[in-house]
Image (cartoon, rainbow, N blue to C red):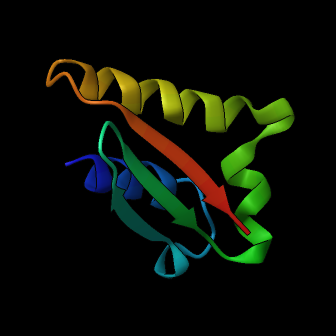
Amino acid sequence: MEKDLVEYIVKSLVDDPASVEVTVVEGEKSTILELRVAAGDIGKVIGKHGRIAKAIRTVLQAATAKDGKHAVLEILD
């Protein structure tokens, strides 16, 4: 569910939605979502001063909080 949510949000932000790739790494206490986008779209995902990335992380935490899970979004180059 978390993967689908992040993919949906990011694909609507970028110019090249086909290049959006989200990899899920299950940890012992948390789930790590690794996000890769095209080089030209990285700025659109991060935003000015990281505002968009922070907003995506906030929505992700709100979506996983009711299940008692912890999810971390990592934006990779």
Residue in the foreground of this view, choosing between 68 and 62 = 68
Residue reaching furthest front?
A: 28
Instruction: Tell me where residue 43 appears, x and y as whole percent.
Output: 79, 55
Instruction: Tell me where residue 39 appears, x and y as whole percent.
Output: 77, 75
- The mark total stands at 0
Q: For this view, does 17 lie left or right of residue 31?
A: right
* Residue at 26% over, 29% down: 64
Q: For this view, does 58 lie left or right of residue 24?
A: right
* Residue at 43% over, 48% down: 9
* Residue at 48% over, 24% down: 58
Residue reaching furthest bottom?
A: 18
Instruction: Tell me where residue 65 appears, x and y as whole percent.
Output: 26, 20
Instruction: Tell me where residue 49 appears, x and y as whole percent.
Output: 85, 31
Q: Quadrant of residue 62?
A: top left
* Residue at 47% over, 81% down: 18
Quarter containing the C terminus: bottom right
